[in-house]
Image (cartoon, rainbow, N blue to C red):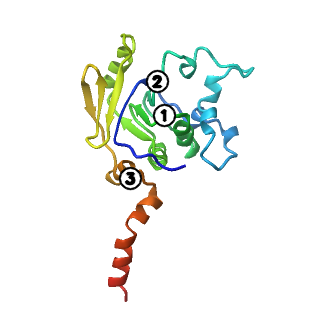
Amino acid sequence: MPVERFNTLVSGYVPLPVDNIDTDQIIPARFLKETSREGFGKKLFYDWRYLGNGDPNPDFVLNDPGFSGKILVTGKNFGSGSSREHAAWAIYDYGFRVVVAGSFADIFRGNALNTGLLPVEVGSAFIDTMMKALELSPAPRLKVDLENQRIKLMPDGISEGFEIDAYKKNCLLMGYDDIDYLLSRQKEIEKWEKTNKR
């Protein structure tokens, strides 16, 4: 699955204000037999999205037509548990491009960035403000500006900065995975090899 270029995203957001969501809740282990990234979105939060008989759970936010967008807003310690890449794959394949959380498990953060999914860590006060804004009409949106590393609640204009590894930021801006990045530097690498032969 190619990585999409990411610069600025303005979108509605889906609230899931739960702390300590682990990778098994994001994508249950029984669905990890596939090695391709495609198709995991159908299994995202499967045990929360569906009832025991397979019907959609009407109380789960992804089944609520009142919420939509490419941004998932959740609580602290998102993506804890196992190191499975499939959790990031499932979120990306579902259609989310940004996850906003109070904090992320380090391995999940790395897997997300490798997938093209942007993890944005913000303070609890900003998350509280986003959740309260959903009670207003019209529905609020978020503007995520990767170049300037800021997230803004619209239309209010409340904003906060976020951190990201400089290399991964460049890859997202250019739409590169690690191999694409190396290929983009191929001429420089070849020149270096020629001038540094022993």
The label on residue 198 is: none
Residue in front for this viewpoint, 112 or 70: 70
Q: On screen, 132 above or below 162? A: above
| Image-based side of 88 in relation to 186, left or right | right
Residue neighbourhood size for the residue with mark 1, other residues' Cα within 10 Å, grouped as few (<14), some (14–19), many (≥20): many
Residue in front for this viewpoint, 185 or 83: 185
Q: On screen, 169 above or below 190? A: above
Q: Earlier in the sequence, mark 1 or mark 2?
A: 2
Q: Give the amino acid type for the residue marked by disc 1 in the picture.
A: Phe
The local secondary structure at tag 2 comes to: strand
Dots 1 and 2: beta carbons under 8 Å?
yes
Q: Residue at x 66, y 39 (%)?
A: 29
Determine which quarter of the picture holds residue 120: top left
The label on residue 171 is: 3
Residue that label 2 marks:
14
3D distance between C-alphas at marks 2 and 3: 26 Å
Q: Give the amino acid type for the residue marked by disc 3 in the picture.
A: Cys
Residue that label 1 marks:
96
